[in-house]
Structures are given as C-alpha cells and as structure tokens.
Image (cartoon, rainbow, N blue to C red):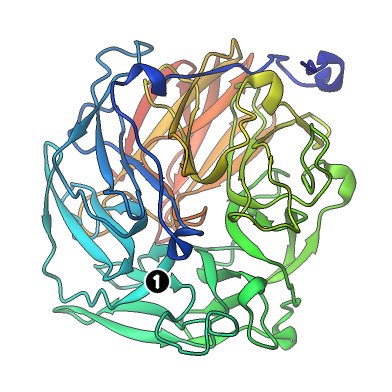
Amino acid sequence: MRLLSCALLAASPVCAQPSFVNRMPEQGFTHQYSGGWEHFVGGGVAAFDCNGDAFPELYVAGGETPAKLLRNDTTTPGGPLRFAVADQMALTGVTGAYPLDIDSDGHLDLMILRVGANQIWRGLGDCQFERADWGFDGGDRWSTAFSATWEPGQDWPTLAIGNYVDRTDPDGPFEACDVNELHRWDGTRYRMEELEPGFCALSVLISDWAREGRRDLRVSNDRHYYVRGGEEQMWRLDEMRLLTEADGWRKTVIWGMGIASRDITGDGRPEVMLTSMGDQKLQYVEDGPRLRDAPFSSGTAAQRPFFGDDGRPSTGWHAEFGDVNNDGLSDLFIAKGNVDQMPSNAMKDPNNLLIQGADGVFTEAADVAGIATVDRARGAVVTDLNRDGRLDIVVVNRRAELELNENQTEGGNWLTVDLQQRGANSRAVGAWIEMRKGGAVEAREVTVGGGHVSGWSGPQHFGLGRAEMAELRVIWPDGTAGDWQMLDAGTHHIVTRD
C-alpha cells in the first residue's frame, strides 16, 4: 500500500495520515442502489438530525429497491456507530434526497427525488414525517438534481429541480433531454416554471458565486445525452434568464455529474468542483460569473484510476469538500464508478480522497485511508456521524453495499457551528460563516443542493490544526453581519440570530 508522505504536507499545521473503517458490516442490515437504465444515474443519500439528539440520520436512495430511513442510534460522542432501519418513506424509484426546513417550523423536511413523481415529506419531530400538502406538483419526470434558496422578501424557499432524459420521447434516450423546473411560492402554494433548454442535468446548486449579494443557479449537464449546442448553464434567478458570454460566462462542455463548492483560496468566494467522465474540473472565480480552470498541477483532475492497470478515463459522480484530518485545509472526496458497462471508461475506478497541502496542491490518499473501493459509487455525504469532531464518509453504491466509513484519523483540532434564526429560513440558508485564525479568513456559505442527488443539513465543521481557538462571525442571509466571537476548539456551537 502506498503511504502518504508527511514531506508532502510539511508546511501544513498538522500532518495526519487519514484512516477510515467501514462500519456497515456491523449494522445488521444491507442496502444497495439497484435498477435498470433509469437508475444508471442517481443513488443519493441525505444526512440530517430528525429527532433532536444531534446525531444525524440517513435517508438512502434505493432505485428499484425501497429507500431506507436509517435512524442513528449512536449513544455517545465518539461511540460505536449504530444505525437501525425506521419504518418511514420506504419508497421505490428514489434517486436521491435533500433535507431543508421548507415551512420554517424548526423541523427538517425532506425533498425526495424520483423516477416518477417527486415528493416532499414534512418533518414532525422524533423522526416522524407526513406527506406535505403545499400545492407542490411532483410531476412524472426523471429527477436527478436539486437546490433551494430563500429569495429576497420570500418566507418560503424557491426549489430548483434538474431532470434527466424525457422517458416519454419515443426517439430517446439520445438527444432527448428533459426541461428543468423552478418551484416558487405564490403566497398559498407552489407554482412551477419550466427552465429550458435542458441538457440532462445531474447536479444543480444555487450560490452567491461572486459574493455580490445575488444567488444564481448553476446547472451541470451530462454531455452524453446532449442536444446540439448543450453546455453548462447559469441562470440569473431574479431576471429568469441564462447568462451568456456577454455577461462574462465562459462556455464549458463536459459530461457533468456533480457540483461542489468551497472557498479554498481564502479570497472569500467559493471555488467550484465539477465531476465528469474524464477530467474532474476545479474552477476559480475571477469576477462575476467568469471562471478559470485550475491547472493540472493542482492535483484535482483525477482523470484516471490512480492504481491498477485500467488506464481508461474515470467516471466521477458526487464531490464534496471537507477537512478530514482537521489540519485547517479543506480536502476533497470524489465518488467514482462506471455508469454500468461503458467500455470507454474504467471498470475498476477507485474513489478519490484528495488531501490538500499548504501550497494548495491536492495529494491522493484514498488507498492509504482505506476507502479506495472500486464498486460503482454514486452519491455520498461527508459528515460527522458520531459527533467526535471527525468527518465520516457515507457512500451509496450501485448494485453493491452501502458504505459507512468512520473517520479514525488522529488529526488536529476542530469546532462546529450550527446556525439558527427565528421566522422564515430557520437554518439560515444563504448565510456566510467567516472563520479567522492566524490572520487568515475562511469563508463558508450555507447552501442546499449540489453533489450528486445527495445533501445534508447540520453543523458546519471547521478543522483548526494546532490552534486551540478561532474567531468566527456570521453574515446572515439578508447581509447583516454579526460580531466576531472567540470560540474554543473541540466544541459544538449553536449561533442564533439574536
């Protein structure tokens, strides 16, 4: 096994070799994402605390297999991971799900995407749910992407849904991409607007990309089914139009699968990670919607399997940033796996765990960490399952077992921050958390969406390296900035608007 050299990370505040153990075999149940061509894509997971004990539950898509709500029965911080199958929302046709508090009652609800009618389930507390009756039209499409935001002056979120192939097109599936959807609250119910053209969306994310106080919708599209002229898209929601080169938008054409965003340069604006068949593409924000590609030397391309003798291109799906060794630098997990039996791409395609060094260069560590599995991975979440301050990694595999990878890395210090506010948008979606340590400021946006049909809601995790405290402030969704506060390492914090 190749070892991650500490010399590569010598300038980092902590040099900790990542280590994970898959706890799924200890759980007493099995789960995999299954199905035919309608489930070649999809296969997501949502992580969220639905009973108030601060240990996140999981809702895992199953495709033709019923989805499962997995209750987190872990009892103590750092204790053994224990999950049990709950008797809720065991739906078939599920491609993925995202948690958010739609009605702002303090309980997280669940947007469930499906091949067929999408559904919203309203959280009632104690991990109980009921089918929501908010006038939402779930349609009958093949939905594969989701994002949400609270637009200015609105008490209910705007919901964006990305759809894949139009299953009703007799000439499909090629050149048969479906339209996407925007659902806006009209004061009494949700009304749907179609976003077209659609180019087979597999990930969407609403973000204030340039820190201009405006949130736009990015759509990542699968070129494999493109209509002529297809490309990545950015919708300006307040004007309901697509950005063009006249706006500074640069045309990008990839087999887009997933979106991740995180400020990794310290300029206060989120970088963008796009997964695809072939190169994975990291982009830096220059100004407005103008982006530039990171150089190959950044170590993020991950274009082929990093071990084995299969030199064909990789297929990237879910991507997510997270500081897995708590050295104060965001790392990057990418779920990989062949669509099914696509001969142009690698069949044994290990997941990536790219560890960031102080010079901004990422180094592969998935094999060292014990998570370089070669099943057909799809969705994932990077979150702390047992509240020990270390980010764990859940991976959904197509026609293979779910993975619950517990982080056992002996890394640096950490802290977590959970935002709450009264009234609409109880979880402060659209807020920015700024963490100041050692003269540097890391900016973190609270978003809903992105990834590959996978999302989470919960505390924001910050690695601190050797620092024993850090300063934090919150810029709330309406732009109001809170005071800087000094927070101790190794602690969980709830920051309220008051």
Of residue 168 and residue 293, the one placed in the foreground of this image is: 168
Q: Residues within 10 Å of mark 1 (few under 14, many from 20)?
A: many
Of residue 409 and residue 244, the one placed in the foreground of this image is: 409
Which amino acid, by three-letter code, is at mark 1? Trp
Where is residue 440 shown, x and y percent of the image?
69, 34
Image quarter hosting the N terminus: top right
Residue shown at 26% from the left, 42% from the top? 68
Where is residue 240 shown, x and y percent of the image?
48, 86
Where is residue 104 shown, x and y percent of the image?
20, 56
Quadrant position of residue 372: top right
Residue shown at 18% from the left, 50% from the top? 89
Task: Determine which residue is flagged by label 1.
Answer: 142
Of residue 42 and residue 35, the one placed in the foreground of this image is: 35
Of residue 124 and residue 301, the one placed in the foreground of this image is: 301
Q: Is residue 291 left or right of residue 50?
A: right
Residue shown at 45% from the left, 50% from the top? 446
Where is residue 412 shown, x and y percent of the image?
60, 15
Say above or below: 126 vs 113. above
Say above or below: 153 vs 33. below
Quadrant position of residue 115: bottom left
